[in-house]
Image (cartoon, grey):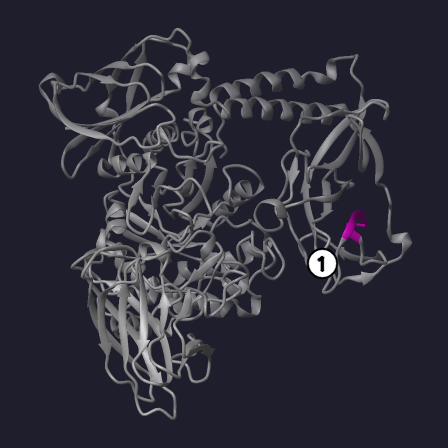
Amino acid sequence: MKALSSCLLLLLMVSSSLFANADKIENEPDFAYLFAYEQDHGLHFAWSINQQEWHIIGPRSFVRCDYGTWGGEKKMYDPYLFLDENNLWHCVWSVNHRDGTFSYTSSEDLINWDVQAYPFVMDQGNCLYPEISSSNSSFTISWLSGDDKSIYKLESKDLIKFGSTVKGNDSDRLNLRTEILVNDIKRTGTIHKVPWVVIEQLLRHAQISDYRNQLYSETTAQDPQRFAGLKGLKATVEVKEEKAKPISDLLMGIFLEDINYSLDGGLYAELIQNRDFEYNASDRREWNSKSFWEIKGEGVDFAIDTKDPIHINNKHYAVLNVKQKGAGLVNKGYGGIPLKKGDKYDFSLFIRMGASNKGGKLKVQLLDEKENIIAEKAISRATNQWKKQNIVLTAKESADAAQLRIVPESEGIYHLDMISLFPQKTFKGRKNGLREDLAQALADIKPRFVRFPGGCLAHGNGLDNMYRWKNTVGPLEARKPQGNLWGYHQSAGVGYYEFFQFCEDLNAEPVPVVPAGVPCQNSSAGGAGQQGGIPMCEMDDYVQEVLDLIEWANGDKNTKWGRVRAEAGHPEPFNLKYIGVGNEDLITHIFKERFELIYNAVKEKHPEIEVIGTVGPFSEGSDYVEGWKFASKLGIPIVDEHYYQPPGWYIHNQDYYDKYDRNKSKVYLGEYAAHLPSRHNNIETALAEALHLNNVERNGDVVIMTSYAPLLAKEGYTQWNPDLIYFNNNEVKPTTGYYVQKMFGENSGNLYLPSKVSLSDNNGAVQKRVSVSVVKDENTADYIVKLVNLLPVSIDAELLIPNIDLAAVTADCSILQGKPDDRSAKPTTKKITGINEVSLPAYSYTVLRF
């Protein structure tokens, strides 16, 4: 399934031809020595004829460890390479100096490696210097553990299931690691005598990888040299409408995950931070239930209690012991509360007086930056039972960073929880709704679907942090908040009901993603990496949870879970058609075993639902290969692909989907973006993404859905760059990439019209930077032409469509253009008459609709 650029494919063909005849060259050795060692926490190779002079094979590693949290945790220590009697290579290594696991993988050619496994074999202690050997079709893995370097071992028949760990002795250790000087640096590893052809294959792979990386590292910064002397070009675009083919009408969508404070503190319109007093150290080390709340003034003690809460899922609440009037409980929201003059705000809280108090009264105030009161109203007397109180506050003045102050009007003990402030102006006027300007920016993309709630958020930081949909429906005070693996808190205020409601408001298909019974491979909780899955004895209950989701979404209001939906205010079904199972998981035995249980149950009980599977986190590698094999074996209708690549990758992989088998799973490109080393969005990244979308649209019969990622990011609160839309409390700041998504979303079609592009310059580098996609929207009968010019010169293009006099046609013309590093460019739109000849500015994306 992996695609290669034409020039890379040519290099492969030439190289293969040369090396195919290697055994006929008499002056080459029959055998050589291969040294396998760790460098920069990856597996590297060097070769030698005489074991004296060693030559490295490429600068990059052949295996990287995928165990651990993101980035620096993914390390390889002391790899041990072994060749069994069936000529299969095995490699084991330590993943760190703490955990009771090792990593294992295998390969037939030392280039293409199987999915890694991380068996937990020590309840206490670590696994250091692992070794592997085989005898009588059984494998033995031994290692050292603890400060005393005690020896342990286990047996395995298939290296999928592992036997019990037992104590070993010195005879169980082979001790074949040796030290070698490689480029004058002492390295430790294992030496293997191999046929010379093995060395040749490794050298060839390294050469191809280097060449490919050179192509992918191309940026517009080299354009002055690459296109020196290039003048304006001419082009002819001939549209072949007779060869039209149907394509997906769901191609453009959005992926909504709570990363970068996208939801809490962002799209979710709640203005109070830690409204439920449930912040804790699992969200962020320095947080607790009092975080973002403070007492201003004297005579009030502020504590947290858990006795008789409003709901078991919302255990903590504030206790104010008021000894004298005047002080107040203050919250400044997410970096200040934005207020607009004349706007109304819904305030609510749950209140209960202490047992010895007869009743209390509160004054609720909104203060501007100078602590002037700009809104104020009293809460009626409370009782000794929890009761929700609601008032409406009207802002007398605007403020960018206001604060909420709650002032007790009498002495006594006050219990407070779920303190909330919402603007009445939310998207579509929804209660518990979404921030109007941000939601509208998403609506303007005209997405055909919304994927939610993740992403890595869906399968969570360990088994206990998986996103469980049932915890996010029902009354807000009954929902179960939890830590967000992106380093903050999930209030569950935007739960499954709100996600589905937003899809309905956008006229977009809901695409919920449930965990495949395994946590995020980057988890830090409960070990790291793919630390296991839901115990198999609990999987029946989990499978039923997934089936219950479908009933909640689509069931009649008289069904158990359909009734829960109806009671929330939506008696009619949501008409769910798709469900994602898993998110860029490692395609391990643990994953496959659990995914198959879920998939088969959904397929049996709900054949009308299309399941979207996963093929790992990258566009190549062991999980990608194994993921596609698994999808083909099960006949999964759609698989979710993810990749974040530099602009050069998109330029040199324009045929990426041309080679995909149309009879196998369809593709949902669920996460992608063009990344420069600076990790900024600009015209260069936007045009690279437009180029790719043109190529995806051409393959809209196999790629049926796409969504850029991540979608939203709050300034000052980001964990990931780049993102499609940046925002703060008062502004929405779309990027150049956003405008590409919007221009595509506004101009989708369901019929692809092939076209032939002829340029006046045949230089391959020039040809690769010009792209055309022509579609037709059969609902409106409109033709839509999308043209990308990723060159530093303009192009005069002649457009030809049979039986249409384009010289007399009036079209809507939208153009996004700028210098490559322009980060603030916006498209311009105008009507033009006569589109038989169109000028494409340098570094531009043009859309014609007529």
Is 262 one of the magenta-colored residues? no
Query: Quadrant location of residue 778?
Result: top left
Give the class, few, some or many, for how many residues have Cα within 10 Å of label 1's Cα (few <14, many ≥20).
many
The residue to which callout 1 is attached is 100
Q: Is residue 83 left or right of residue 693?
A: right
Residue 147 x, y percent position in the rendering: 82, 58
State the residue in front, 459 or 83: 459
Q: Residue furthest top?
A: 229
- Kindly give the residue lying farthest to the right in the view shown: 171
The answer to which of 375 and 162 lies nearer the viewer is 375
Looking at the image, is 418 positioned above or below residue 658?
below
Q: As displayed, is residue 331 above or below residue 724?
A: below
Q: Can residue 158 be seen at all in this image of the molecule? A: yes
- The residue lying at 79 percent from left, 48 percent from top is 129
Type of the residue with mark 1: Gly
Viewer-closest of 328 and 515:
328
Highlighted magenta segment, given as a residue range: 128-142
- Please indicate whether residue 94 sits to the left or right of residue 718 in the image: right
Q: Is residue 570 visible?
A: no
Horizontal side of residue 610 vs 79, given as left or right:
left
- Determine the main secondary structure of the stretch shown in magenta: strand
* Residue lying at 57% horizontally and 66% vertically, measured from the top left: 536
